[in-house]
Image: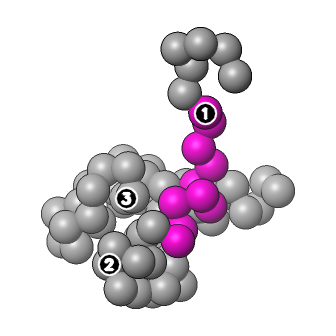
């Protein structure tokens, strides 16, 4: 890695931390997001931040996770 560069973090890399910090499996969060899949990415993330007190990084990782799984 070049000096001063951060490693690229994929959404899946956040899963263990999210589950540990919030005590729920990622499937719990994905079920809730599935119900609002017609909303935009940042609207979904904002919902997770406000309703479930998730941090911005965790919220955006959870929203991006299903899309990343489909592209893999």
Q: Which residues are magenta?
A: 7-16
- Tell whether 72 sits left or right of 6: right
Residue 55's place in the image compared with 3, above or below, is: below
- In the image, what residue occupies the spot 52% across and 60% down? 14
Q: Residues within 10 Å of mark 1 (few under 14, many from 20)?
A: few
- The residue at which mark 1 appears reads as 7
The residues bearing labels 3 and 1 have C-alpha atoms spaced at a distance of: 19 Å
Type of secondary structure dominating the magenta stretch: helix
Residue 28, given in percent of the width and then of the height, sits at 45, 86
Q: Which mark's residue is nearer the viewer, 3 or 2?
A: 2
Residue in front for this viewpoint, 26 or 43: 26
SS under mark 2: helix
Determine the residue located farthest toward the top in the rendered image: 3
**Mark 3 vs 1, N-terminal side:** 1
- Marks 2,1: beta carbons within 8 A: no
- The residue at which mark 2 appears reads as 22
Q: Residues within 10 Å of mark 2 (few under 14, many from 20)?
A: few
Residue 8, given in percent of the width and then of the height, sits at 62, 36
Residue in front for this viewpoint, 59 or 8: 8
- In the image, what residue occupies the spot 56% across and 19% down? 5
SS under mark 1: loop
Residue 7, given in percent of the width and then of the height, sits at 61, 33
The residues bearing labels 3 and 2 have C-alpha atoms spaced at a distance of: 12 Å
Residue in front for this viewpoint, 50 or 13: 13
- In the image, what residue occupies the spot 41% across and 77% down? 20
- The residue at which mark 3 appears reads as 59
- Tell whether 12 sits left or right of 19: right
- Marks 3,2: beta carbons within 8 A: no
Quadrant of residue 12 within the rendered picture:
bottom right
Q: Is residue 8 magenta?
A: yes
């Amino acid at each position: 890695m070049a000096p001063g560069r951060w490693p690229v973090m994929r959404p899946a890399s956040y899963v263990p931390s999210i589950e540990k910090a919030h005590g729920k499996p990622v499937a719990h969060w994905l079920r809730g997001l599935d119900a609002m899949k017609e909303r935009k990415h940042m609207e979904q993330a904002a919902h997770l931040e406000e309703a479930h007190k998730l941090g911005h990084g965790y919220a955006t990782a959870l929203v991006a996770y299903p899309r990343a799984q489909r592209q893999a």
